[in-house]
Each structure stands twice: as structure tokens, then as C-alpha cells.
Image (cartoon, rainbow, N blue to C red):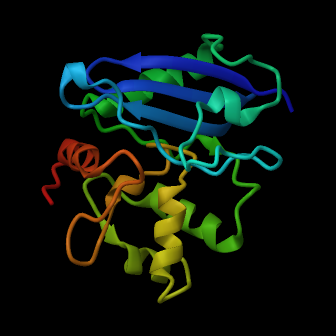
Amino acid sequence: MRAEQTRYRVPDWGVGELWTSNRLVLAHDFRFEAAAPTAGFVEGFRVDAPKGVHGPPTGTVPPLSIRMGNGSVSNGQRERGGAWRDVLAERIAAFLAGEEVTFDDIELDLSWTTPFQRAVAEILRRLPRGEVVTYGELAALAGHPGAQRAAGSFCARNRFALLVPCHRVVGSEGIGGYGSTGVAVKRRLLALEGIVV
């Protein structure tokens, strides 16, 4: 399977990186800019590396161009994909601008997931804008009451940033975490949808 990379910038938000094969999204990462312009970038979403690719021992995640490791796009090379990928990047930018955009029509590669992880991803994709669930509620909706930690682990390693909206999952006693990007980004994303936590 030949994977193609598309990188794009969303002003005041950061840089996105899509990996696709035809119209199948293999992964989507987004590196959110820090709130202060001089502070640089906040680390992007932590995702599981594809089979056969191992993450660095520090627990940080290299850019997708390294993680995918299939040689179709070399590390550091910037490509703009075909019209479909460009339109998807524009839809993500519109979402971050506060427009009511959904991504439920985008086909994601979930072949690597367990049945529970697939159920979690599908539930999150159907969760309407402006609504939240707790990790416990998410696990129960996925058919595994009491598996809130497993639901949280899936969200922490979500390889489809924004396309599987893990920012809509909150803790039972507050906002909860948001991978390595931090709570400030999660609050900002929820505020786009009219949710104050």
C-alpha cells in the first residue's frame, strides 16, 4: 500500500499531517502551537506506531513521516496531495475555525484495532459536536462497562487527531487529560463547540 503525505498549516492552531492511501486515511497528526507565539510547538498527539515501527524510548513520538516508515515520502519532504487530501485539510481548517464540520464520511484505516478499540472509534465519530461523554460512559457505550482506562488509553494514542474527536471525552470529575498536547488545547477545542469545562 503506497502512503502519501500531506502537510498543511492552520493559522493560530498549528500544523497537520495526513497520511492517506487513495481515499483511506491511515493516520492524521496535528501539532498544536503553544498559546504564546514565542513558545514554539506543543508535542502532537501520541499515536501507536504502525506494526514494525518502534517509537523512541523516551516516549515522545516522531513525526508521522518517520513513523510510517514505508519510504514513499522521505522524512522532511513536504508534499501537497491530490484534490481530495487538500479538501480534507481545508475541512479540518474550517473545523478549527469554528465551523460545523463533520468527518463521519471519511474512511479511516481501523484494521489495526481490537473490536473494543474499533467500537470506541466508531462511537466517538458519531458523537455530535457540542456533546461530551466520560471515559466510563464511552467504555459502556462500546460494550465494556468498567473499561474506562482502556477507553482513555485509546484516546491517548488516537492516531486520527480531530477525525476521531477524543477531545469530547472528559473525566468523571473534570476535563481529564488530552494526550501530550495538554488540557489547554482540549479546553480550546471544546470551546469551539460551545462547551466550557
Q: Position of residue 161 (x, y in %)?
A: 48, 43
In the displayed structure image, the side of residue 139 where residue 134 appears, left or right: left
Task: Identify the image quadrant of the C terminus.
Answer: bottom left
Q: Which residue of the protein is positioned furthest toward the front in this rendering? A: 58
* Towards the viewer: 83 or 181: 181
Q: Is residue 86 above or below residue 42?
A: above
Residue drawn 48% across the image and 55% down it? 125
The reply to whether residue 29 is in sight is yes
Which quarter of the picture shows residue 92? top left
* Towards the viewer: 141 or 170: 170
Which quarter of the picture shows residue 64? top right
The image shows a total of numbered marks equal to: 0
Q: Position of residue 112 (x, y in %)?
A: 75, 57
Residue drawn 60% across the image and 14% down it? 83
Residue drawn 73% across the image and 46% down it? 54
Q: Which residue of the protein is positioned furthest toward the left in this rendering? A: 196
In the displayed structure image, the side of residue 77 where residue 32 appears, left or right: left
Q: Is residue 181 above or below residue 18?
A: below
Q: Which residue of the protein is positioned furthest toward the right in this rendering? A: 1
Q: Is residue 142 above or below residue 97?
A: below
* Towards the viewer: 71 or 102: 71
